[in-house]
Image (spheres, helix red, strand yellow):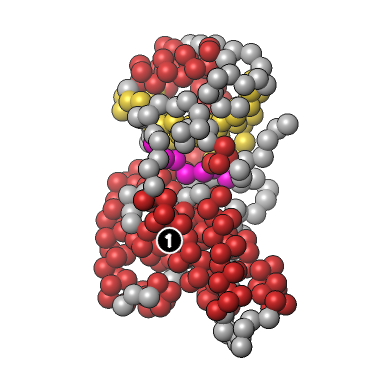
Amino acid sequence: MALSEAVLTRWFEEHRTFLWGVCYRVTGSAADADDAVQETFIRALKHAPKELAEPRRWLVTVAVNASRDFLRRRKRQSYIGPWLPSPIETADDGPLPSYEPAAGAGHTFEGRYDLMESVSLAFLRALEALTPTQRAVLLLCDVFDYSAAEVAAALDLSEGNARTIHHRARHAMAAYDTRRTPPTAANRQRTSRVLERFLTLLGNADVPGIERMLSADIRAVTDGGGEFSASPYPIVGAARVAQFFVRLATSRPVGVRVRVIDLNGFPAALFEFDAAMGRRPPRLVLAVDLDTDGFIAGVWVVASSRKLTAVPSQN
């Protein structure tokens, strides 16, 4: 017998935000997470058993598989320029982008990576090195603390295969693990100070000052999604990165509002422009990644309008 709409509605209300967080982590896209959650409940309406002792576990299985489908489709499609995750707002005094209520005795399903770190832009960027199945296995094991047997059941794998995939996924994340910077209060404050200084120097068109803030192997990545002008390749080197951003800033010197907001666990800058200018974006997000010495090791700019659907406008 098919699941009743009343039961489905209750499940939707109880588990939607949790499932959205799972789907966002798997896809790295807020828009795809929206679609994957909708697909999850469509599948639930058609295929869910009438009685389930743990509906969330069943829904997570469906959501992860729907998300893997979205991820596979994205990876098969050509993308113009570098791909970056879509940012989401994370307020200091609000819930996580996916609020995971405690499962008892204070346990929150957290594993090797905590919940906020697992939505950081650096973490989501690192996940791009994994296959869709590796990504799902790593997230279920190392964020949501699933056992190998539970992962195997969720993804229709043998337990041995799940363990092998998990091992390979962890190996692929080794470079991230050596430089990981979880969004602790200290790391957030440090990033905020550096970002504010960077924005001040950018407003003053101070190329030497910006260059002194950058690590020797700095990489800047801009994602316009083919919709807006963006560098088709990463920009590498302190001098080139400093000159690139000052040149951009001075090309649109007026009619811009800049606000520092909390995105994916860290402070980031939201730029919004009053007037259109060719293929320049009407708004963009700029985030920085720091090395252990406090220098800027990465600058990420997201301008694609589809990528910014989860970032509220100031207007």
Q: Is residue 84 magenta?
A: yes
Residue shown at 58%/19% (left/top)? 277
Looking at the image, residue 297 sits to the left or right of residue 203; the answer is left
- Give the image location of residue 266, x and y in percent: 54, 40
Residue shown at 33%/54% (left/top)? 130
User: Judging from the image, what secondary structure is the residue with disc 1 in?
Assistant: helix
On screen, residue 284 above or below 199: below
- Give the image location of residue 61, x and y in percent: 48, 71
Q: Which amino acid lies under the numbered mark 1 shown in the image of this protein?
A: Arg
On screen, residue 272 above or below 113: above
- Give the image location of residue 146, x and y in percent: 43, 71
Q: Nearer the viewer, residue 267 or 12?
A: 12
Q: Nearer the viewer, residue 2 or 267?
A: 2
Quarter of the C terminus within the rendering? top right
On screen, residue 118 above or below 161: above
Q: Is residue 279 visible?
A: yes
Q: Is residue 126 magenta?
A: no
Quarter of the figure with residue 59: bottom right
Q: Residues within 10 Å of mark 1 (few under 14, many from 20)?
A: many
Quarter of the figure with residue 107: bottom right
Residue shown at 70%/76% (left/top)? 5
Q: Is residue 300 visible?
A: no
- Give the image location of residue 162, x and y in percent: 32, 71
On screen, residue 237 above or below 185: above
Q: Main secondary structure of the magenta part?
A: loop
Quarter of the figure with residue 209: top left
Quarter of the N terminus within the rendering? bottom right
Query: Which region is colored magenta?
Result: 82-89
Instruction: Please give the residue where the numbered disc 1 appears in the rendered image.
Output: 68
Residue shown at 35%/29% (left/top)? 233
